[in-house]
Image (spheres, rainbow, N blue to C red):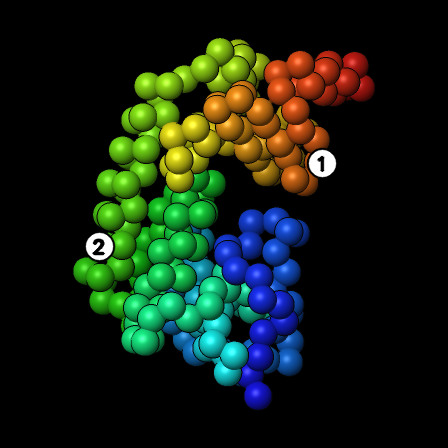
Amino acid sequence: MKTIYSKQEGVKMNSDLDFGGTKDIQNQFQYLMDTLETPLNEEFKYFYRVTDDNFIQLAYSYNESELTIIAQYRLRFQNLKENINFIVNNNIEAKCPYNGYPTFENSSVFTKQEFEAIITTLKNSNKAITDKAFEHTTPFINFLKENNLHPFPSGDFYTNWNARCPSGRSHFITISTEKDEWGCGYCRREGKQAELEKWLLEIKEAS
């Protein structure tokens, strides 16, 4: 019986989501598509799996690595393609602030035109949100710019931004301009501008 490891839903961006491994279930995944991603145009292969407990999972392989489950959602539609479209759309939307938009290479489910329609819809939606975010820039966003943390709108809501993590590692801090708060799940730090100033000073003194 094909079942899921946990009932969590979403796109895995950090350790808060755990969908389990694929070592014993790798042969249950069906090929979905190849894309080119990241600024280096690296090739990713995607696969999907529908479970007997009514979930759909999206997994990828990079550079012939073992499959990694990147997203999981409860089935929402009767049509399989609609469920695949839903999970692919959510995966692209979650990752595009960091990797940009993927380029279509090949697919067993989507035509090139269908895939590009998903990208166009996301770009139009994100542009409207991004424009509104820039219209509501706060002094805290300016502070981040002054400290070379390169803030940018996340694209999912106009008060949500991301910025380079002060730790120098390859992840981002998340920001809400509603109350000018920030947090880093990897470094387990959070607060407002005062807390970030303190952290920046700690890093400076330690270097």
User: What residue is rendered at 54% in x and 21% in y?
Assistant: 180
Between residue 80 and residue 66, name the one nearer to us.
Answer: 80
Q: Which residue is mark 2?
A: 117
Q: Which residue is identified by label 1?
A: 188
Write down the quadrant of residue 138 in the picture.
top left
Of residues 132 and 146, the one nearer the viewer is 132
Residue 3 vs 170, above or below: the answer is below
**Image point 40% across, 39% down: which residue?**
156
Q: Specify few, some or many for label 1: CA neighbours under 10 Å numbering under 14, 14-19, or 20 or more.
A: few
For badge 1, the amino acid type reads Arg
Q: Nearer the viewer, mark 1 or mark 2?
A: 1
| Residue 23 left/right relative to 153 | right
Q: Which residue ends up furthest to the bottom in the rendered image? A: 1
Q: Is residue 47 left or right of residue 113?
A: right
Label 2 CA crowd tier, 10 Å (few <14, some 14–19, many 20+): few
The amino acid type, in three-letter code, at marker 2 is Ala
Seen from the viewer's position, the closer of residues 124 and 55 is 55
Residue 79 in view here: yes
